[in-house]
Image: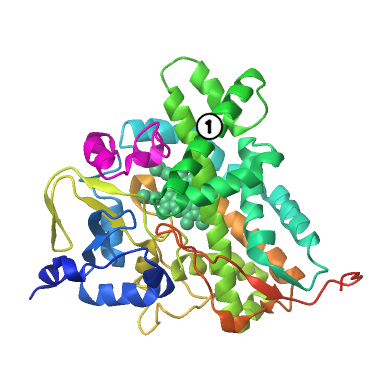
Amino acid sequence: MTWHEETVTPARLPEVGTPDFKTHAHVRYAELRARAPIHRVRMPDGSLGWLVVGYELARTALAHPLLSKDPGPFEEELRASGRHILLAGSGFGGNMLMADPPQHTRLRRLVSGAFTTGAVDALAPRIEELAHQHVDAFARAGEIDLVAAFTGPLPMAVICELLGVPAERRDDLQTWTRAAMANPSDRQRAALVALNTYLRSLLEQKRRHPQDDLLSRLIAVRDQADGQLSDTELLGTAVILVAAGHETTVNLLGNALVALLDHPEQARELRLCPERIPGAVEEFLRYDAPVETTPTRFATERFTLGGAVVEAGDTVTVALTSAGRDAPVGAGRDPNRLDVLRRPARHVSFGNGIHYCIGAPLARLEAAIALRVLLTRLPEMAWARPAEGVTWLPAGITRGPVRLPVTFTPEKGSDAA
Ligand code: HEM
């Protein structure tokens, strides 16, 4: 029996995103990788698709010219299987992540200037200030859930300041984004409607009262009426920047902290040499990629990928969390071992090719600053209830901890119990 026959047998079809798969993700991915770099699987939305689990094949698939990001031509199938949220105007659609050139090139160019390393570096002092403000709020408590108090709200504050989303709506936005990234359900669809409705009204307000923020600048481009950006695309861009710019970074920070809490000796190393934190961020991205599986790609024609025959219209998803554990990390150096000093920490956790993450410089900067602030201000940080183990978010597409209960030595001048 070839690996192909074995994995397409329906009774044995691996199911991605189930509670069992989420809990034992690295073991399950290792089992799949041992058999083949690509498998026929049941996706969290119930559909069948191809899942790429090997590092080299992941690089190839992410940049493959026969794999389209545009769901438009597959509208009928998507509607029939309840996956119409991918279509323009239905939730997540109408943005660069769901587009092919030339639409992709045009949409990406409109915002790329805001996310270059130079533009993002200018945000460093404000990110540092925000990180300290969040720690100030609990530094004297001695025990806290870092997801609720730090890794959740900080990236939301950063992206909302950049886009110009008022502070009082950030909690709502966070609730909707998290629900929207969850596995398909009525709750997910309702969250997407709420997110779209709110952002549409925010864009209207900003059209009337422009401010110095990215959404106001995009509206100005839209209103120049030179055909660069339609209303659907404007909304789609706002939705993708909020969604992709937030939950991903929350989980990068969350996964980095899980890794550091599990390896206190490596946390000590970084406290002693904070200049190594940016390198360590690459290792955290590799070790536990926060985007577990990429959004769907559609085969535009029949072709062979890693030995599998992909038919026109088949969907292909890349398991970045698996690829990180398959990445070439050097002879004799186990990819399943965390090594914050590892060079190079190769990964595809920000993708590859034309859809390579536009927010990567921001995510890297934010993670490096946030981790430095935490490691400095909470030197004795440890799991509060280590025996419990980590509960991972149930969503198929994201990987991150639900909670991070930690204890630490309260800061001096404590008036807390
Ligand atoms: C740790 C944090 C992040 C991770 C792991 C991450 C991961 C990714 C990945 C894997 C892709 C490519 C998906 C694919 O090819 O199917 C992507 C694309 C994208 N990301 Fe991120 N991302 C992060 C943070 C951000 C931030 C902070 C922003 C923005 C503000 C952002 C905005 C985007 C956008 C707009 C795209 C689409 C780019 C395109 O299609 O050309 N991301 N991201």
Which is nearer the eye, 340 or 398? 398
Q: Which residue is mark 1?
A: 197
Verify whether residue 78 appears in magenta. yes
- Which residue is at the front of the view, 187 or 62? 187
Q: Number of callouts in the render? A: 1
Depth order, front residue of 1/387: 387
Residue 361 at least partly seen: no
Relative vertical location of residue 275 with respect to residue 99 in this rendering, above or below? below
* Residue 60 position within the rendered picture, expressed as x and y whole percent measured from the top left: 26, 56
Q: Quadrant of the N terminus?
A: bottom left
- For image coordinates 61% across by 55% down, the residue present is 366
- 378 horizontally vs 392: left or right: right
- The three-letter amino acid code for the residue at tag 1 is Thr
Magenta stretch: includes residue 307:
no
In the rendered image, the vertical position of residue 216 relative to residue 150, given as above or below: above
Q: Residue at x 56, y 21 (%)?
A: 220
Q: Give coordinates of residue 237: x percent, y percent.
A: 47, 35
With respect to residue 233, does 363 lie above or below?
below
Q: Secondary structure at mark 1?
A: helix
Give residue 277's quadrant in the image.
bottom right
Q: Give x and y (percent) for residue 200.
A: 54, 28
Check the image and name the residue furthest to the front. 186
Indicate left or right for 302 with 218 as reference.
Answer: left
Q: Position of residue 8 (x, y in %)?
A: 15, 65
Question: Which span of residues is magenta-colored?
Answer: 70-97
Quadrant of the frame with the C terminus: bottom right
In this picture, is 131 found above or below 190?
below
> For disc 1, does the CB lie below 8 Å from ligand 1?
no
The quadrant holding residue 144 is: bottom right
Residue at x-position 51% and y-position 45%? 243
Q: How is the image coloured?
A: rainbow
